[in-house]
């Protein structure tokens, strides 16, 4: 079980690092698009497509970290309302619902990726399947993250709720207790 949790944490961190790199690519190519269109009056044919594609990959990969570390905004409200004993049931229900949706994304994402593999992306001249592949890849990373989260919480290795706190939250808590 410890190996699975370490592997899941590694894949979650990997997905997050690649997501950040995709976000950097999206920002850089978006800036390039604006520069070529409005400053040089010669719009690029490929930068808008690459920006959109990098954003899609960034979102689907970052989704794994949100699931693993419990940063789902709507669920946070429920944690405040439900008594401590009921949180296990809430985690189980939310986890199973997420797994169902992620399994559907994985299954149909693979089908869609295969279906569009013969089409090319305008401006980049690569198969559009490379972009659609973000759906099943992100879903697979997220399934591992949800399973690791549930396993860690139900075995008592992690508390229910968010796993990581931001620096501001930690500082606020320490400052309030001083």
Image (tube, helix red, strand yellow):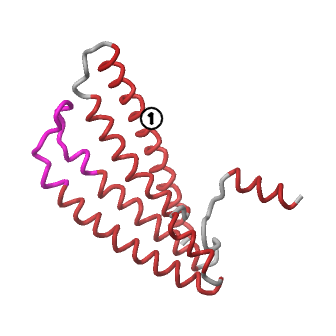
Identify whether 86 is placed above or below 36.
Answer: below
Q: Position of residue 132 (x, y in %)?
A: 24, 50
Identify whether 93 is placed above or below 102.
Answer: below
Report the quarter where the N terminus lies: bottom right
* Image quadrant assignment for residue 46: top left
Q: Position of residue 117 (x, y in %)?
A: 14, 48
Relative to 37, is 82 on the left or the right? right
Residue lying furthest front? 38
- Taking the spot 35% from the left edge, 67% from the top edge, the residue there is 102
Residue at the disc numbered 1: 24
Magenta segment's dominant SS is loop
The boundaries of the magenta stretch are 113-133
- Taking the spot 70% from the left edge, 51% from the top edge, the residue there is 168
Relative to 132, is 7 on the left or the right? right
- Taking the spot 83% from the left edge, 59% from the top edge, the residue there is 176
Q: Between residues 80 and 138, which one lies in front from this camera angle?
A: 80
Does 118 appear in magenta?
A: yes
Q: Between residues 123 and 156, which one lies in front from this camera angle?
A: 123
Report the quarter where the C terminus lies: bottom right
- Taking the spot 35% from the left edge, 24% from the top edge, the residue there is 34
* Image quadrant assignment for residue 161: bottom right
Density class for disc 1 (Cα within 10 Å; few <14, some 14-19, many ≥20) is: some
């Amino acid at each position: 079980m410890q190996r699975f949790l370490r592997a899941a944490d590694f894949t979650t961190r990997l997905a997050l690092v690649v997501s950040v790199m995709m976000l950097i690519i999206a920002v850089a190519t978006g800036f390039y698009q604006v520069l070529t269109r409005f400053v040089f009056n010669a719009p690029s044919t490929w930068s808008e497509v690459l920006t959109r594609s990098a954003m899609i990959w960034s979102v689907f990969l970052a989704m794994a970290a949100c699931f693993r570390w419990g940063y789902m905004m709507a669920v946070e409200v429920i944690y405040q309302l439900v008594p401590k004993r009921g949180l296990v049931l809430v985690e189980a229900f939310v986890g199973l619902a997420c797994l169902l949706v992620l399994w559907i994304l994985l299954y149909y994402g693979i089908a869609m990726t295969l279906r569009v593999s013969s089409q090319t992306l305008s401006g980049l001249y690569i198969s559009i399947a490379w972009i659609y592949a973000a759906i099943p890849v992100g879903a697979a990373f997220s399934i591992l993250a949800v399973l690791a989260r549930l396993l860690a919480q139900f075995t008592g290795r992690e508390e229910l709720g968010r796993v990581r706190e931001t620096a501001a939250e930690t500082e606020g808590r320490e400052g309030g207790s001083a």
